[in-house]
Amino acid sequence: MVDYKNKIQEIRTNIQNCHLCELHKTRDITVPGEGPISSTIMFIGEAPGKINNEVGLPFVGHGGKIFDKILSLCGIERKSIFITNILKCWPPENKKPKTKEIQYCKKYLFDQIEVIKPKIIFALGTTAYETLTNKKIKIKKEHGIPIIINNIKIVPIFHPNGIRYIKGGIKTIVEDIVKNI
Ligand code: URA
């Protein structure tokens, strides 16, 4: 029988020891993700921010507060879901992840998905969605519309960090989540 707890710990250790791309030189702490392995829902963002890099946890600080508010409006308990990012290290100046960084790092994400086997993945923003699906998306038009890959429903939603540019703001993100759970 596979020991899933050990598996997820092994992935964490692999991330912590990773030197595959340049980002290991500038990171303080890796941000592997958090949540129970029994999670049926995963939320996947783009990359850790500066504060995440300091504490080793995803979606904390200002962006985390917005994220927590969204979860609470959806009736989702943070401790019941698995939260992670495409990149596990902070790209300095919060630069957009480079193709090479994504290519190296996505193996860890796919390993996490294989262990957790979620029913639903909410992809926060285009980078997350396009990495997960290999499909280009116009998020302004296609947010909230799921596709199924390997029995997992993958739903593109707006990234909460860009909330001030999103028509409808938090309400739109909440509606996209609620109609898909
Ligand atoms: N913090 C994260 O952990 N991920 C993001 O995508 C943005 C902020």
Image (cartoon, helix red, strand yellow):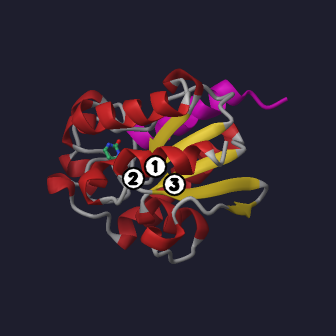
Considering the numbered disc 2 on the image, is that residue within a helix, a strand or a loop? Answer: loop
Q: State which quadrant residue 140 falls in.
A: bottom left
Q: Which residue position holds label 1?
A: 173
Considering the numbered disc 1 on the image, is that residue within a helix, a strand or a loop? Answer: helix
Q: Residue 87 bears which disc, if any? A: 2
Q: Which SS type dominates the magenta stretch?
A: helix
Q: CA distance from mark 1 to mark 2?
A: 22 Å
The residue that appears at 58% across and 41% down in the rendered structure is 42
- Of the numbered discs 2 and 3, the one sitting upstream in the chain is 2
**How many marks on residues?**
3
Q: Is 32 situated left or right of 80 in this image? A: left
Q: Quadrant of the C terminus?
A: top right
Q: Within the magenta stretch, is there residue 3?
A: yes
Q: Which amino acid lies under the numbered mark 2 shown in the image of this protein?
A: Leu
Residue, far right: 1
Frontmost residue, 157 versus 95: 157
The mark lying in front, picked from 1 and 2, is 1
Label 1 crowd (10 A; few <14 / some 14-19 / many >=20): many
Frontmost residue, 107 versus 14: 107
Does 69 appear above or below 122? above
The mark lying in front, picked from 3 and 1, is 1
Q: CA distance from mark 3 to mark 1?
A: 11 Å
Does 89 appear above or below 102? above
Q: Which residue position holds label 3?
A: 123
Q: Which residues make up the magenta segment?
A: 1-16
Residue, far left: 93
